[in-house]
Amino acid sequence: MATIRVGLIGFGMMGRMQAEGCFRALGDRFRIVCVCDDYPSHLEEARALLGTGMVAYYSDWRRMLEDCEFDLAAIVTPDHLHEEMALECLRKGRHLRLEKPMALDPAGCRRIAEEAKRSGKVVQIGLELRYAELTDIMREAAKGTGRTKMLWCSEFRHPFLAKPGSVPDWNLRRKYSGGTLVEKCCHHFDLFNLFAGARPISVYASGDGETEYPHTNILDNAFATVEYGNGIRANLSLCMFAPRKAKQEHLTELAFGILGSAGRIEMRDDKLFVWDRPTGSERRFAHQREDGIGHNDEITPSLLDLAACIEEGRTPQADIRAGFNSVLVSWAAELSAAEKRVVTIEEVERRFDAPWME
Ligand SMILES: NC(=O)c1ccc[n+]([C@@H]2O[C@H](COP(=O)([O-])OP(=O)(O)OC[C@H]3O[C@@H](n4cnc5c(N)ncnc54)[C@H](O)[C@@H]3O)[C@@H](O)[C@H]2O)c1
């Protein structure tokens, strides 16, 4: 099994975490051969972490693509750069590990999907909740809860962390991130799409940014309801100014639930409860790790899937379809909250000439 040579673009919070915690830990499958960041102190940090012997460093990603031989581009830059970088990397014959959201809007996702098809390269989107152990258990448990009727998700967390890179605090501005419901909640909408297993029909979202982000144009709290073609309703509650969980048992940061005709599944951070409606019995699962679902340890299994897909020419679990469809719903939610009206998915599909991917 050949080692996959990785070119990492973006050495901020997530790029550093991937380099240190994930690619290095999977040293038999991946080897970082070049790193690019146009913020000098982040490039210095990369040098300090990865050394100068085997790794080349660049401040210009296009030059890195020309100069350096590598198999997989890991794009970990602010969201507005994803599309341009992804397209160019695919054109230059690289496989992609592309952070979420896949692009700022559905048209950008469509262009990446088209280029990926032309190139025949493997593309994985950083929707790693698909790889969480508890997501797997929920999928299994959902087979026994009858007809799914309701999905719900709540994330009550601390505000976005400060971003000191070359596009400082990009996540606080919609033109760089697509807005909170795109940047942050594409993860949640992806889980809704996964568990609903049907086309979404419409979204109604309501929110504001007055508490945490009064001087910028992003939301800090919102409710969003998605209706699916098979009758499932999914509701997201987001708050970005709740206190940090900080190991306080009574505070739940991320929760996800499935309510079906024959039972109920509820995940609260690192614990999962399954109730069987006919018998009233309850089963409880505990996550192996303390930090629970929704944290970056899901990236390691996602990278193992990616390595196998590159080797076998398969499509990853977090594929282009998942990336695209999550942005379609997220974008509809942003539009709904901005214009205070129900937005149909059809409207967004038409606007971007970007239909839902079956
Ligand atoms: N999957 C997840 O759970 C998860 C979690 C956090 C962040 N992310 C995603 O990861 C990406 C990066 O987020 P982050 O938190 O690391 O942000 P960050 O701001 O900490 O890091 C981004 C880095 O990209 C660099 N950069 C900016 N423009 C560049 C350019 N033209 N060329 C080279 N480097 C450039 C910046 O200098 C910075 O070092 C975002 O897309 C974000 O949505 C995903």
Image (cartoon, grey):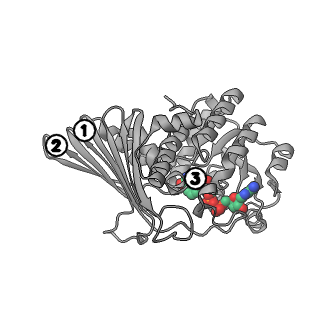
Across and down, in percent, residue 95 comes to 69, 38
What amino acid type is highlighted by mark number 1? Thr
- Please tell me in which quarter of the rendered image ligand 1 is found: bottom right
Residue at which label 1 appears: 145
Compared across the picture, whether 43 is left or right of 237 comes to: right
In the image, what residue occupies the spot 82% across and 57% down?
53
* Residue 305 disc label: none
Crowd around label 3: few <14 · some 14–19 · many ≥20 (10 Å): many
Residue 124 in the image: state x and y as whole percent: 60, 40
Residue labelled with disc 2? 277
The answer to whether the residues at label 1 and label 3 have Cβ atoms under 8 Å apart is: no
Q: Quadrant of residue 203?
A: top left
Q: What is the C-alpha distance between the residues marked 1 and 3?
A: 35 Å
Is disc 3's CB within 8 Å of ligand 1?
no
Could you say which is closer to the camera, residue 198 or residue 265?
198
Q: Nearer the viewer, residue 338 or 315?
A: 338
Hey, what amino acid is under mark 3?
A: Gly
Q: Is residue 307 visible?
A: no
Task: State yes or no: discs 2 and 1 in contact (Cβ < 8 Å).
Answer: yes
**Residue at label 3?**
178
Which element carries disc 1, helix, strand or loop?
loop
**Crowd rating for badge 1 (residues with CA inside 10 Å; few <14, some 14–19, many 20+):** many
Which image quadrant is residue 65 in? top right
Q: CA distance from mark 2 to mark 1?
A: 8 Å
Q: State the SS at label 3.
A: loop
Q: Position of residue 36 (x, y in %)?
A: 77, 55
Q: Earlier in the sequence, mark 3 or mark 2?
A: 3
